[in-house]
Amino acid sequence: MSTTTYAWLVLAFPLAGMLIVAFGYRVLWGRGAGWIATGAILLSFAASVGALISLQGHDPAHRQIVSTLYHYASTVGVNADMSILVDPLSVFMILVVSGVSTLIHLYSVSYMESDRGFARYFAYLNFFVFAMLLLVLAGNFLLLTVGWAFVGAASYLLISFWYRRTTATRAGIYAFVINVVGDVGMVLGTYFIFKHTHTLDLLGSFHAAGAGAFGHATNNGDLVAGCVMLLVAAFAKSAQLPLHTWLPDAMEGPTPVSSLIHAATMVTAGVYLIARTHVLFELAPSAQDVGAIVGVATLLVAGTIALAQPDIKRVIAYSTMSQIGYMIMGVSVGAYAAGLFHLMTHAFFKALLFMAAGSLIGAMAGEQSLDRMGGFRRALPFTFACFVIGGLALSAIPPLSGFFSKDEILLVTGERGGWHWALYVLGYIGSLLTAIYTFRIIFRAFFGKPVEEASKLEAGVVTHGHPANPATGEAEDTDVGFPGPAHAIAERALPMRIAMSLLALGATGAGLVQIPKVDSVVDDFLRPSFADSSLYATHTKNGLLAVGLAVGAVLGLAGIAIAYRVWVARPGTATVVRERVPALYGLLANKWYFDDALERFVVAPMGALGRLARGGIERVFVDEALVGGTSAIVRAGSAAVRAAQSGFVRYYAALLVLGVAGVSFYFLLQT
């Protein structure tokens, strides 16, 4: 098969899986919907591997291949085709998306087994993966926008999957609305680009831009505006400041959904978008600077918030925001391979951390607060080991994967020189924060005196509490629209253990794919996609590399030591600090007041405007003036006509005579 045939199959398998599960769930056996959906994504991964092998058979100069299934529209100079672009960048992304998604599907087979919406869940999950694969394979801006919107729609369906929970439906709507803001940014960015390049084709747009479609100077106004709009799309989808507030609330969905959103799909889309449109961003360095600054601001803000959050899933969510900030900063300063390399390693250890958190939450009968956890080290040995591996990789401790990928981003940032040194230093401060909040989770959940649930589990009894919303404490049942009655833990579910074991291997060894100054597998593979980049170069500052790797390792270990001292050696330290600096704690616990500011300055004014429109414009002008006035005129006319219908022949005869007389008089006047 050709390279593009493999790529079309990558899309076809999850789409087929979704349709089979959605329409055939009534006749499927037991967990059949889960196994069919998992098999569909596994076949998609196999096709991705086939595309990789086939693409490597092409000459490096011919590794950007466009395939058109059919011509969708051609009018007024707009040619929109159902076309995909198969190149090293898209193949890299489909390998990560389909590979990690397969393991998340496998994990879900056990985790969601008792849920009454089992088949619906897997149909949504397949659709989510299909949407992300469509996004990264799109060959033109139209299809890219379709994939972008599909990902937002799929996230809404999965975040609000337990639709009888008001917190879940509210979070789903919240995520959807902010992602629509990103969709608007994508459309406006496409408009500014199309205005000058006169094509929606990605490669065509890049070639036109390089040939001077925006002039031969950098920072053309329309181009900067277009790139800033693309950044709006990226920030909304990847949860970067100030469009990040939906991501922690998205933890209302099932834990495997959180894993899928954070590791393999949605939030990585912004990183991909900037990397894919790098030609445009390099011609608009002002927009690049905006991306880098927002990225570093996000990684710091999210890192500090994670220090004060009690919900285990929300801490990991803010960790994702922070790590995506590194990637956004990386691709915005020209560290394309490093940013994408970190995207890959992050997918392994972040999916692993969410899965381990899911197992821990299962042992706690759905409870997610770290304040209620403790002493699970012996009760959940496998989960503990996976959490430690994921935590070490996230904290960039050598020789785990995060150590190599994160430090390479900072290396390239430092090599840019000038004001980028500030980004370099702030990036390492973020590394210290990462280690502290990561091991805050581990030490609070797995060390200390075992809680009641941990003690029972050590005796072989899994706790099954009364169904309740972990966010509000509201009582629930286990029927459709709420979580099922069973609580899965990895120690007792083979599919969960298999998925977590493979991710643990990836989190441990994926960094060895590209060791700085030793090999450059990722750099060399991606090079054809960035052949037209002036920033894609081999790094040469060996001294800076050595210093960076050493500083990164020391800061990671220092962060673990700080976390150990605060939450294990001296367990009351956090309370003392909180009491001594209540203002700082309030700032972090309230998430830098972003949610409050958004509520006060955006949601409340828009709500007031809506009420004004409904109570004033709609009721008075539309209902009473337009609709009511029109109906009043009709009623008056009909009343006059009814009055004329008296039923007396002499009355009708008189009207006829008057009419004839009137017409006659009119013609007399005309003559």
Image: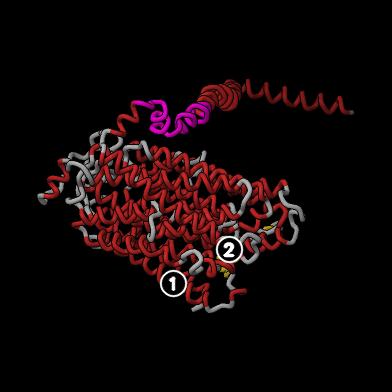
Please name whichever residue, 508 or 550, is drawn nearer the observer in this view of the structure: 550
Answer left or right for 529 relative to 283. Answer: left
Provide the major secondary structure of the magenta segment.
Answer: helix
Which residue does the numbered mark 2 point to in the structure image? 540
Answer left or right for 496 relative to 319. Answer: left
At x 10%, y 49%, the residue is: 459
Q: Secondary structure at mark 2?
A: loop
Q: Nearer the viewer, mark 1 or mark 2?
A: 2
- Seen in the picture, residue 383 relative to 591 is either above or below; the reply is below
- Sequence-wise, which precedes: disc 1 or disc 2? 1
Q: Is residue 257 visible?
A: yes
Answer left or right for 599 relative to 213. Answer: left
Q: Residues within 10 Å of mark 1 (few under 14, many from 20)?
A: many
Q: Is residue 464 visible?
A: no
Give the colour scheme shown.
secondary structure
Magenta span contains residue 595: yes
Which residue does the numbered mark 1 point to in the structure image? 49
Residue furthest to the right in view is 671
At x 33%, y 26%, the residue is: 579
- Seen in the picture, residue 372 relative to 75 is either above or below; the reply is above
Which quadrant: the C terminus? top right
Please provide the residue range marked out in magenta: 580-606
Residue 648 picture location, percent across and down: 58, 21
Residue 244 picture location, percent across and down: 47, 41
Residue 622 picture location, percent across and down: 57, 27
Residue 274 picture location, percent across and down: 57, 54
Amino acid type, residue under disc 2 in the picture: Thr
Q: State the image quarter where residue 511 is shown.
A: bottom left
